[in-house]
Image (tube, helix red, strand yellow):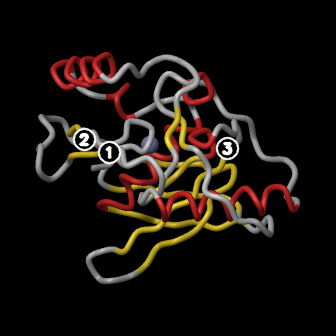
C-alpha cells in the first residue's frame, strides 16, 4: 500500500466539485487503503479523495476524542447536517484548523459545534454519526473538500489575507504542486 502524494492548494482537483462514487469495487478499496496509509504518515486526522488527486466524494478520518474513543472510518457519498454556527470571532487557540493541502499552516475558523454525518461504507451500507466538538469540525472540513472548498476559503477577512500571503510566499496557488508524507517534511 503506497503513501500517495498530497495535492497542495492551487491544484484544480482541490477546487472542483467531486463526483459521486458509483463503483464499490477493488479499485475503491485500494484507494481507501492508500488514503488511510497516507493520512497516518502525514499525519492527519482526515483526508479527502481530492487531496490525493481523485475527484470522488469520499473521505477518511481518524480521531481519538476526549473520552479516548477512537473514531476511524471512511465516509463515501456523505451528506452532512449542521447545527447553526455561533456568531463571533474564532479563538486562535481553541479553533485553529489545519489542512494537509496547506501543509504546516493553521488559521482559526468558526465551525458548527454539532453535525450529523450520513454516508456509505465500503460494503455499501449506510451509517450515521452524530458528532460534536473536534469530530464535527473534521467532518465539516473533509466534507467541504468534496465541494472544492478549502478551509482557507472560509476564513474571515484578516485571516484570509494572512493565508493568501502565506500561499503567495510559498509559491502555492498554482497547479501541479504536491508533497509526499514521509519524504517531504512540510509539517515541521
Ligand atoms: Zn483539508
Task: Please tell me how crowded label 3 is: few (under 14), some (14-19), or many (20+) other residues with Cα within 10 Å.
Answer: many
Depicted 156 relative to depicted 28: above or below: above
Report the residue marked by disc 2. Answer: 106
Task: Please tell me how crowded label 1 is: few (under 14), some (14-19), or many (20+) other residues with Cα within 10 Å.
Answer: some
Mark nearest the camera among 3 and 2 is: 2
**Helix, strand or loop at mark 1:** strand
Question: Taking 97 as reference, is 75 left or right?
Answer: right
Report the residue marked by disc 1. Answer: 98
Question: Taking 14 as reference, is 66 left or right?
Answer: left
Q: Residue 57: which quarter of the image?
A: top right
Which quadrant of the figure contains the N terminus?
Answer: bottom right
Alpha-carbon span between mark 2 and mark 1: 5 Å
Q: Position of residue 163 (x, y in %)?
A: 26, 25
Mark nearest the camera among 1 and 3 is: 1
Q: Position of residue 113 (x, y in %)?
A: 29, 53
Is the residue at mark 3 in contact range of ligand 1, meaning its CB lies under 8 Å from it? no
Amino acid at each position: 500500500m503506497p503513501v500517495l502524494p498530497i495535492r497542495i492548494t492551487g491544484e484544480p482537483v482541490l477546487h472542483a466539485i467531486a463526483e459521486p462514487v458509483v463503483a464499490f469495487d477493488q479499485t475503491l478499496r485500494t484507494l481507501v487503503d492508500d488514503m488511510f496509509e497516507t493520512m497516518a504518515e502525514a499525519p492527519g486526522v482526515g483526508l479527502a479523495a481530492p487531496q490525493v488527486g481523485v475527484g470522488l466524494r469520499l473521505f477518511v478520518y481518524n480521531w481519538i476524542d476526549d473520552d479516548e474513543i477512537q473514531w476511524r472510518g471512511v465516509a463515501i457519498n456523505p451528506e452532512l447536517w449542521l447545527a447553526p454556527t455561533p456568531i463571533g470571532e474564532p479563538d486562535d487557540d481553541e479553533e485553529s484548523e489545519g489542512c494537509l493541502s496547506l501543509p504546516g499552516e493553521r488559521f482559526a475558523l468558526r465551525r458548527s459545534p454539532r453535525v450529523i454525518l450520513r454516508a456509505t461504507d465500503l460494503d455499501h451500507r449506510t451509517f450515521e454519526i452524530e458528532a460534536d466538538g473536534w469530530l464535527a469540525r473534521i467532518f465539516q472540513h473533509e466534507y467541504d473538500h468534496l465541494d472544492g472548498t478549502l478551509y482557507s476559503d472560509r476564513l474571515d477577512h484578516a485571516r484570509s489575507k494572512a493565508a493568501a500571503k502565506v500561499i503567495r510566499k510559498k509559491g502555492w496557488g498554482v497547479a501541479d504542486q504536491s508533497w509526499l508524507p514521509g519524504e517531504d517534511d512540510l509539517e515541521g
